[in-house]
Amino acid sequence: MSGWLIILTGIIYAYVALEQGMKGNTGMLLAYAGYAFANIGLYMVASK
């Protein structure tokens, strides 16, 4: 998987997390924030 695609996916997950947080849906906020954070590790592996 290419690095730019992982970054784009992480940005989308972070956006969805913020959107869910603004709606007051804390569970989904945490879930999507976790997905966004996990993409940092994926990017590190892919760019190695």
Image: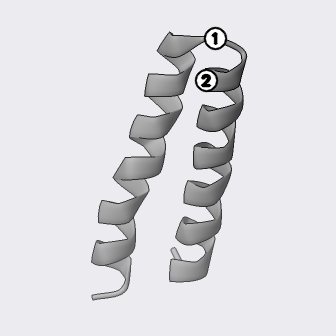
Say which residue appears at 36% left-offset and 86% top-offset.
47
Number of numbered discs on residues: 2
Look at the picture and state if 41 lies above or below 48.
above
* Viewer-nearest residue: 26 or 35: 26
Instruction: Indicate the secondary structure of the residue bearing disc 2.
Output: helix
Say which residue appears at 38% left-offset and 50% top-offset.
37
- Horizontal side, residue 22 vs residue 35: left or right: right
Q: Which residue is mark 1?
A: 24
Residue type, mark 2 in image: Gly
The percent position of residue 42, horizontal first and vertical second, equals 36, 64
* Viewer-nearest residue: 19 or 12: 19
Instruction: Tell me the crowding category of disc 1: few under 14, some 14 to 19, or many 20 or more residues within 10 angstroms, Cα based.
Output: few
The percent position of residue 9, horizontal first and vertical second, equals 62, 58
- Horizontal side, residue 24 vs residue 39: left or right: right
Q: Which residue is mark 2?
A: 21
Look at the picture and state if 38 lies above or below 8.
above
Q: How is the image coloured?
A: one colour
Residue type, mark 1 in image: Gly
Say which residue appears at 28% left-offset and 74% top-offset.
45
The percent position of residue 18, horizontal first and vertical second, equals 63, 36
Instruction: Indicate the secondary structure of the residue bearing disc 1.
Output: loop
Answer whether labels 1 and 2 touch (C-beta < 8 Å): yes
